[in-house]
Image: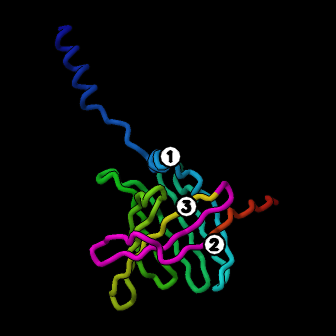
């Protein structure tokens, strides 16, 4: 009887659900917790705002980008089947974009693909570099038809952490 109980206990440990990594774990592993928050910049084309906020604590980030004539809402989560960090979003024209997050050198990078009204795909890499606690740089990379990201960015710009709004 003891052998049977011991066997059942061992099997229970083997087949017990394993704790899965969360998006928060992946972000911490990449030392990129600093990306969560609201970031703003003034560019030649107007004001840009980008925010990352927890929609479901530790598991789903909501992203909101607003620029001159562009706006996009996205959700970011860890795909438990592939262990990839994925992003899916829609812009003000209703166009869907999909992408995956991963490293580009020492920066977190989103490789994003979207389709226009005519069904043409366009892709880009968006890498984030922390300058300090209140400043980041975004670098934009070309992505070829095979999904390969260019070695060097096409351009970049800095954003500042938005000041928290006073609660009323």
Tell me where residue 84 appears, x and y as whole percent: 35, 55
Per the image, label 1 sits on a secondary structure element best described as helix
First of labels 2, 1 by sequence position: 1
Per the image, label 3 sits on a secondary structure element best described as strand
Above or below, 130 against 68 in this view is above
The Cα–Cα distance between marks 2 and 3, rounded to whole angstroms, is: 16 Å
Please tell me the numbered disc located at residue 28. 1
The image quadrant of residue 82 is bottom left
Write down the residue under mark 2: 49
User: Is 98 situated left or right of 159 in this image?
Assistant: left
Above or below, 45 against 55 in this view is below
The image quadrant of residue 105 is bottom left
Per the image, label 2 sits on a secondary structure element best described as strand
Please tell me the numbered disc located at residue 132. none
Write down the residue under mark 3: 129
User: Is 114 situated left or right of 159 in this image?
Assistant: left
């Amino acid at each position: 009887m003891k052998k049977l109980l011991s066997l059942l206990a061992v099997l229970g440990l083997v087949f017990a659900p394993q704790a899965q990594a969360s998006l928060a774990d992946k972000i911490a592993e990449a030392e990129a917790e600093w990306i969560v928050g609201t970031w703003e910049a003034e560019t030649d084309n107007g004001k840009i705002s980008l925010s990352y906020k927890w929609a479901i604590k530790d598991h789903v980030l909501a992203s909101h980008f607003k620029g001159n004539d562009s706006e996009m809402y996205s959700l970011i989560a860890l795909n438990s089947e592939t262990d990839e960090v994925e992003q899916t979003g829609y812009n003000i024209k209703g166009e869907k974009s999909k992408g995956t997050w991963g490293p580009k050198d020492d920066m977190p990078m989103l490789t994003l693909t979207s389709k226009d009204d005519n069904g043409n795909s366009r892709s880009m890499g968006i890498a984030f570099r922390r300058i300090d606690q209140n400043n980041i740089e975004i670098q934009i990379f070309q992505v070829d038809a095979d999904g390969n990201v260019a070695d060097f960015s096409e351009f970049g710009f800095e954003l500042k952490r938005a000041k928290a709004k006073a609660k009323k």
